[in-house]
Image: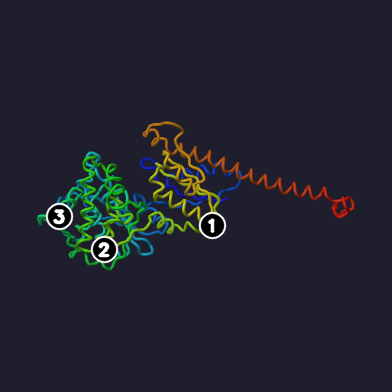
Amino acid sequence: MKFILAFDKFKGSLTSEQASACAARAVRAVVSDIEEPDIVVLPTADGGEGTVDAFLAACGGTRVECNVTPPHVSPDTDDRTAAEFAFLSDGRCVMEMAQASGLSLVPEERRDPMHTSTYGTGEMICAALELGARRILLGLGGSATNDGGCGMAAALGAKFYAHDGSPILCPTGADLIRIGTVDLSGMDARLHDCEITACCDVDNPLFGASGAAVVYGPQKGARTEDIPTLDVGLANLADILYRDHAIDIRTTPGAGAAGGMGGGVIAFLGGRLHSGIDAVLDAADMNRHLHDAELVLTGEGRVDGQTARGKVIAGILRRAAGAGVPVYVFGGSVEPEAMTLYDDGASAIFSVCPGPVTLAEAMTHAEVWLYDRVFAAMRVYCDGYFAIARRICREKLGAVFAAKTMETPDGTDAESDGM
């Protein structure tokens, strides 16, 4: 019996690898009484934290470290933080925006997308260019920013000017509404020879009711009263890029990913957007593994409405549904909106927590509770599996018995004798 384990992280408690290892122990504890299971652990990530690790696990390669400006720090200071990216064995360079401009890099009391920038991500890209990178996969997710990628562009040579002509050296979220002109003539020339793909799994537009600021600003520390400023700033940036450079990201799905970095990759780097989970699953050759799999087990810390909009689990469900393989989903918390995952092909959705608990309790006991829930789910799965097998055997035996009773003592068919 072959089982695929493809867990995302349970943020703050279990990494993707730890969650998969925990689930593997539970699967073996149940299935090994029947036969030794074939367990395939696939690396997963959707462009946020863990993307580099997932690609290295799937493809192999080497890690590289560089020093960059943290998102809450001005680049004219000496404050730097270490960021890692990787060169894969096939020559591609994989990096995470979260390594250079991530929320985890900002002290909690300073988390505010009005005053953070993606400058460090631009420095990381520059470091990769220096090492000869010409195919770059940039994972979007986990960002502390809402600057539409302007900080990144500034680090790579773009110039920004306010309506009064004064320079804006490193635009932050609060600066976007002030921008009057964008000069792209000084962008690093090596970018022209690069193929840059942004890995993201959300389809939010740049601005508006479903845009970057409104949907994701609060979780980055934005105050309610600042959301309109951030949103109008992104709209202003998009209007200028369209007016002066004929670059239209105003309604592009995914442009709102990572505080507008999705749109920034298209506008400033000439890149494209691609599903992060699909890129990882392609690298891990998931379609081949699904061919003879019995069941897929997946999960993440919070299964909610955003899960269905393109996160890891949604990507796995698409693949498994195409192969006709059932999927069990496990969540540290399961919100009512997650029930839409049944429409996307989930066979069962399980809450890991045994009942109402505090967040601290859930994170402390995540590994034990995940094991218990996977163990219970596998018991149900195996009971059902063998119940079907027993039913088929009974039906076949019943058919054989019925055929035997229709024979006459001399072996001829009873019906042929007119009986």
The label number, if any, that marks residue 324 in the structure image: none
Toward the right, the furthest residue is 410
Please, what secondary structure does the residue beneath circle 1 have?
loop
Between tags 2 and 1, which lies in front? 1
Contact? badges 1 and 3 (CB < 8 Å): no
Crowd class of label 3 (few under 14; some 14 to 19; many from 20; radius 10 Å): some
What amino acid does circle 2 point to?
Leu
Q: Position of residue 128 (x, y in %)?
A: 27, 61
Which badge, 1 or 3, is on the more N-terminal residue? 3
Q: Confirm or deny contact between disc 2 and disc 3 (CB under 8 A).
A: no
Mark 2 touches mark 1? (CB < 8 Å): no
- Residue marked by disc 3: 169
Q: How far apart are marks 2 and 3 (CA)?
A: 22 Å
Q: Name the residue under label 2.
A: 129
Nearer to me, 68 or 237:
237
Q: How far apart are marks 1 and 3 (CA)?
A: 53 Å
| CA neighbours of label 1 inside 10 A, class few (<14), some (14 to 19), many (20+) | few
Q: Which of 88 and 111 is in front in this view?
A: 111
Q: Which residue position is annotated with label 1? A: 291
Q: Would residue 41 be found to the left or right of residue 67 on screen?
A: right
Circle nearer the viewer, 2 or 3: 3
Give the residue at the far bottom of this rendering: 193
Task: Inspect the image, locate mark 3, and give the three-letter code of the amino acid beneath it.
Answer: Leu
Is 87 left or right of 126, judged from the image as shown? right
Q: Position of residue 81 (x, y in %)?
A: 24, 50
Q: Which of 46 and 50 is in front in this view?
A: 46
Distance of label 2 from label 1 (alpha carbons): 39 Å
Numbered disc total: 3
